[in-house]
Amino acid sequence: MSRSRPKVFAIIPAAGSGTRIGGEIKKQFLPLKGKPIIVHTLQQFEHCSDIDEVAMAIPESAMSDMEAIVARYRLHKVSKMMMGGKKRQDSVDNVLNHLTLKDSDIVLVHDGVRPFIETKRITHLLKVCKEYDAAVLAIQPKDTIRRSTGGGFFDQTLDRTALWMVQTPQAFRAKLLVKAFEKARKDKFYSTDEAALVERLGVKVRIVEGNYDNIKITTPEDLELGALILDRWHAKGLM
Protein backbone atom coordinates (compact mmCIF):
# COMPACT_ATOMS: atom_id res chain seq x y z
CA MET A 1 0.00 0.00 0.00
CA SER A 2 1.52 3.33 -1.09
CA ARG A 3 1.94 6.27 1.25
CA SER A 4 -0.61 9.03 0.82
CA ARG A 5 1.46 11.88 2.26
CA PRO A 6 5.09 12.92 2.42
CA LYS A 7 6.96 11.66 5.46
CA VAL A 8 9.51 13.44 7.59
CA PHE A 9 12.74 11.60 8.38
CA ALA A 10 15.36 12.81 10.85
CA ILE A 11 18.95 11.67 10.32
CA ILE A 12 21.07 11.95 13.46
CA PRO A 13 24.81 11.57 12.83
CA ALA A 14 26.38 10.46 16.10
CA ALA A 15 29.44 8.58 14.95
CA GLY A 16 32.11 11.09 15.97
CA SER A 17 34.99 10.23 18.25
CA GLY A 18 34.68 13.36 20.38
CA THR A 19 38.42 13.84 20.70
CA ARG A 20 38.15 17.53 21.67
CA ILE A 21 36.18 16.77 24.81
CA GLY A 22 38.73 14.24 26.10
CA GLY A 23 38.25 11.00 28.01
CA GLU A 24 37.51 7.45 26.84
CA ILE A 25 33.72 7.81 26.49
CA LYS A 26 32.54 9.16 23.15
CA LYS A 27 30.95 12.56 23.70
CA GLN A 28 27.47 11.53 22.48
CA PHE A 29 27.34 9.00 25.32
CA LEU A 30 28.66 11.29 28.04
CA PRO A 31 26.14 11.87 30.83
CA LEU A 32 24.35 15.21 31.02
CA LYS A 33 22.52 15.39 34.35
CA GLY A 34 22.49 11.59 34.54
CA LYS A 35 21.34 10.87 30.98
CA PRO A 36 23.49 10.41 27.84
CA ILE A 37 23.64 13.50 25.63
CA ILE A 38 22.33 11.51 22.67
CA VAL A 39 19.22 10.57 24.64
CA HIS A 40 18.37 14.21 25.36
CA THR A 41 18.70 14.88 21.62
CA LEU A 42 16.64 11.90 20.48
CA GLN A 43 13.86 12.59 22.97
CA GLN A 44 13.22 16.00 21.39
CA PHE A 45 12.53 14.28 18.06
CA GLU A 46 10.57 11.50 19.75
CA HIS A 47 8.26 14.11 21.25
CA CYS A 48 7.86 16.11 18.02
CA SER A 49 4.65 15.02 16.31
CA ASP A 50 5.94 16.14 12.90
CA ILE A 51 8.74 13.56 12.87
CA ASP A 52 7.84 10.12 11.46
CA GLU A 53 11.14 8.25 11.65
CA VAL A 54 14.61 8.75 13.09
CA ALA A 55 17.68 7.08 11.58
CA MET A 56 21.10 7.20 13.20
CA ALA A 57 24.75 6.84 12.25
CA ILE A 58 26.81 5.54 15.15
CA PRO A 59 30.23 3.95 15.69
CA GLU A 60 30.28 0.22 14.96
CA SER A 61 31.75 -0.40 18.41
CA ALA A 62 28.76 1.32 20.05
CA MET A 63 25.99 -0.48 18.16
CA SER A 64 24.93 -2.79 20.99
CA ASP A 65 25.10 0.03 23.55
CA MET A 66 22.93 2.23 21.34
CA GLU A 67 20.39 -0.54 20.86
CA ALA A 68 20.16 -0.88 24.65
CA ILE A 69 19.71 2.89 25.04
CA VAL A 70 16.92 2.99 22.45
CA ALA A 71 15.11 0.17 24.25
CA ARG A 72 15.64 1.60 27.74
CA TYR A 73 14.36 5.08 26.88
CA ARG A 74 11.59 3.80 24.58
CA LEU A 75 12.73 5.76 21.56
CA HIS A 76 10.14 4.22 19.25
CA LYS A 77 10.81 6.51 16.28
CA VAL A 78 14.38 5.24 15.88
CA SER A 79 13.91 2.94 12.89
CA LYS A 80 17.49 2.47 11.69
CA MET A 81 20.95 2.45 13.22
CA MET A 82 23.70 2.43 10.62
CA MET A 83 27.46 2.29 10.96
CA GLY A 84 29.08 5.70 10.69
CA GLY A 85 31.55 6.62 7.98
CA LYS A 86 35.02 8.11 8.04
CA LYS A 87 33.63 11.66 8.06
CA ARG A 88 30.31 13.16 9.09
CA GLN A 89 29.24 13.53 5.46
CA ASP A 90 29.96 9.83 4.84
CA SER A 91 27.80 8.91 7.83
CA VAL A 92 24.83 10.97 6.64
CA ASP A 93 25.25 9.63 3.10
CA ASN A 94 25.24 6.04 4.36
CA VAL A 95 22.01 6.56 6.30
CA LEU A 96 20.39 8.47 3.44
CA ASN A 97 21.06 5.57 1.07
CA HIS A 98 19.25 3.15 3.39
CA LEU A 99 16.03 5.16 3.72
CA THR A 100 12.97 4.41 1.61
CA LEU A 101 12.20 7.88 0.32
CA LYS A 102 9.70 9.53 -1.97
CA ASP A 103 10.83 12.66 -3.80
CA SER A 104 8.38 14.82 -1.83
CA ASP A 105 9.47 13.54 1.59
CA ILE A 106 11.49 15.79 3.87
CA VAL A 107 14.81 14.78 5.37
CA LEU A 108 16.10 16.65 8.37
CA VAL A 109 19.71 16.30 9.56
CA HIS A 110 20.63 17.13 13.14
CA ASP A 111 23.84 16.75 15.16
CA GLY A 112 23.60 14.07 17.81
CA VAL A 113 25.30 16.34 20.34
CA ARG A 114 22.86 19.27 20.00
CA PRO A 115 20.37 18.28 22.71
CA PHE A 116 18.71 21.69 23.11
CA ILE A 117 16.53 21.84 20.03
CA GLU A 118 12.95 22.89 20.79
CA THR A 119 10.20 20.82 19.20
CA LYS A 120 8.39 24.01 18.17
CA ARG A 121 11.50 25.12 16.28
CA ILE A 122 11.64 21.78 14.45
CA THR A 123 8.02 22.27 13.45
CA HIS A 124 8.67 25.80 12.16
CA LEU A 125 11.75 24.68 10.22
CA LEU A 126 9.74 21.94 8.51
CA LYS A 127 7.00 24.41 7.59
CA VAL A 128 9.56 26.67 5.90
CA CYS A 129 11.17 23.71 4.15
CA LYS A 130 7.84 22.68 2.66
CA GLU A 131 7.64 26.12 1.05
CA TYR A 132 11.27 26.60 -0.05
CA ASP A 133 12.57 22.97 -0.31
CA ALA A 134 15.66 23.78 1.77
CA ALA A 135 15.91 25.50 5.17
CA VAL A 136 18.45 25.70 7.97
CA LEU A 137 18.53 27.10 11.49
CA ALA A 138 21.07 29.86 12.07
CA ILE A 139 21.82 32.63 14.54
CA GLN A 140 23.68 35.91 14.17
CA PRO A 141 26.87 36.51 16.18
CA LYS A 142 26.60 38.77 19.20
CA ASP A 143 30.26 39.77 19.24
CA THR A 144 32.24 41.87 16.82
CA ILE A 145 33.79 39.61 14.18
CA ARG A 146 37.23 40.50 12.80
CA ARG A 147 39.31 38.75 10.15
CA SER A 148 43.00 37.93 10.42
CA THR A 149 44.76 36.40 7.43
CA GLY A 150 48.08 35.72 9.13
CA GLY A 151 46.88 35.27 12.68
CA GLY A 152 49.03 37.99 14.22
CA PHE A 153 47.04 41.09 13.40
CA PHE A 154 43.50 41.94 12.31
CA ASP A 155 42.91 42.76 8.64
CA GLN A 156 39.25 43.69 8.61
CA THR A 157 36.16 44.11 10.79
CA LEU A 158 33.25 42.23 9.25
CA ASP A 159 29.64 43.40 9.20
CA ARG A 160 28.04 41.02 11.68
CA THR A 161 24.53 41.87 10.47
CA ALA A 162 25.43 39.94 7.29
CA LEU A 163 26.92 36.97 9.15
CA TRP A 164 25.16 33.84 10.39
CA MET A 165 26.31 30.96 12.58
CA VAL A 166 24.74 27.86 11.08
CA GLN A 167 23.11 25.28 13.33
CA THR A 168 21.15 22.09 12.87
CA PRO A 169 18.56 20.82 12.12
CA GLN A 170 18.83 21.43 8.41
CA ALA A 171 15.81 20.32 6.37
CA PHE A 172 15.50 19.45 2.68
CA ARG A 173 13.18 17.82 0.20
CA ALA A 174 14.39 14.25 -0.19
CA LYS A 175 14.90 14.45 -3.96
CA LEU A 176 17.08 17.55 -3.55
CA LEU A 177 19.24 16.14 -0.76
CA VAL A 178 19.80 12.82 -2.53
CA LYS A 179 20.88 14.66 -5.69
CA ALA A 180 23.23 16.88 -3.67
CA PHE A 181 24.92 13.89 -2.05
CA GLU A 182 25.22 12.09 -5.38
CA LYS A 183 27.00 15.11 -6.89
CA ALA A 184 29.28 15.50 -3.87
CA ARG A 185 30.19 11.80 -4.05
CA LYS A 186 30.92 12.05 -7.77
CA ASP A 187 33.03 15.22 -7.32
CA LYS A 188 34.71 13.91 -4.15
CA PHE A 189 33.61 17.15 -2.49
CA TYR A 190 33.30 17.41 1.29
CA SER A 191 31.65 20.08 3.41
CA THR A 192 30.84 20.42 7.09
CA ASP A 193 27.09 20.69 6.50
CA GLU A 194 24.35 19.62 4.09
CA ALA A 195 23.36 23.16 3.10
CA ALA A 196 26.67 23.65 1.30
CA LEU A 197 26.08 20.47 -0.72
CA VAL A 198 22.62 21.63 -1.75
CA GLU A 199 23.90 25.09 -2.67
CA ARG A 200 26.29 23.45 -5.15
CA LEU A 201 23.18 22.52 -7.15
CA GLY A 202 22.34 26.22 -7.49
CA VAL A 203 19.60 26.05 -4.85
CA LYS A 204 19.24 28.82 -2.29
CA VAL A 205 18.76 27.70 1.29
CA ARG A 206 16.24 29.61 3.40
CA ILE A 207 17.47 30.93 6.75
CA VAL A 208 15.30 30.19 9.79
CA GLU A 209 16.21 31.94 13.02
CA GLY A 210 17.58 29.52 15.58
CA ASN A 211 18.14 29.72 19.32
CA TYR A 212 21.34 30.51 21.22
CA ASP A 213 20.64 27.56 23.54
CA ASN A 214 21.00 25.16 20.61
CA ILE A 215 24.69 24.56 21.25
CA LYS A 216 26.82 21.73 19.92
CA ILE A 217 28.55 20.03 22.83
CA THR A 218 32.17 19.75 21.75
CA THR A 219 34.37 20.77 24.71
CA PRO A 220 34.26 20.24 28.50
CA GLU A 221 33.09 23.87 28.83
CA ASP A 222 30.15 23.08 26.54
CA LEU A 223 29.19 20.21 28.83
CA GLU A 224 29.17 22.55 31.84
CA LEU A 225 27.10 25.11 29.92
CA GLY A 226 24.75 22.34 28.81
CA ALA A 227 24.04 21.42 32.43
CA LEU A 228 23.02 25.02 33.14
CA ILE A 229 20.80 25.16 30.04
CA LEU A 230 19.18 21.86 31.02
CA ASP A 231 18.34 23.17 34.50
CA ARG A 232 16.72 26.24 32.95
CA TRP A 233 14.80 24.14 30.42
CA HIS A 234 13.53 21.83 33.15
CA ALA A 235 12.35 24.85 35.13
CA LYS A 236 10.42 26.04 32.05
CA GLY A 237 9.05 22.56 31.30
CA LEU A 238 10.84 22.36 27.95
CA MET A 239 12.45 18.97 28.63
Image (cartoon, grey):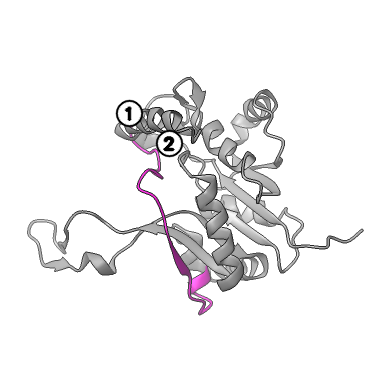
State the image coordinates of residue 50 (x, y, percent, origin top left).
Answer: 65, 51
Q: What residue type is labelled 2?
A: Gly
Q: Is residue 26 above or below residue 210?
A: above
Picture layout, residue 166 above or below residue 131? above
Quarter of the image with the N terminus is: bottom right
Give the side of residue 229 with respect to residue 121, left or right.
left
Instruction: Say above or below: 223 vs 149.
Output: above
Residue farthest along the front direction in this orientation: 236
The kind of secondary structure the magenta stretch mainly shows is loop
Q: In the displayed structure, does residue 151 sit left or right of residue 71?
A: left
Q: Looking at the picture, how far across and down is residue 29, in whole percent? A: 51, 28
Residues 17 and 51: in front is: 51
Q: In this view, does 224 lie to the left or right of 25?
A: left
* Mark 1 to mark 2 CA distance (whole Å): 16 Å
Q: Which mark is residue 205?
A: none
Question: Which residue is depicted at the point 53% across and 49% down?
Answer: 120
Q: In this view, does 41 lie above or below 24?
A: below
| Residue shown at 66% from the left, 45% from the top | 54
- Check disc 1 and give the amino acid type: Glu
Range of magenta residues: 198-220
Q: From where the camera sits, is residue 189 visible?
A: no
Residue that label 1 marks: 224
The residue that appears at 48% across and 65% down in the rendered structure is: 195
What number of labels is visible?
2
Q: Residue 18 carries which label?
A: 2
- The foreground one among 146 and 125 is 125
Instruction: Indicate the secondary structure of the residue bearing disc 1.
Output: helix
Where in the figure is residue 163, as x and y percent of width and height?
29, 65
Residue occupying the point 61% across, 50% down: 11
Q: Quadrant of residue 138?
A: bottom left
Specify few, some or many for label 1: CA neighbours under 10 Å numbering under 14, 14-19, or 20 or more.
few
- Asked if residue 85 lies in the magenta stretch, the reply is no
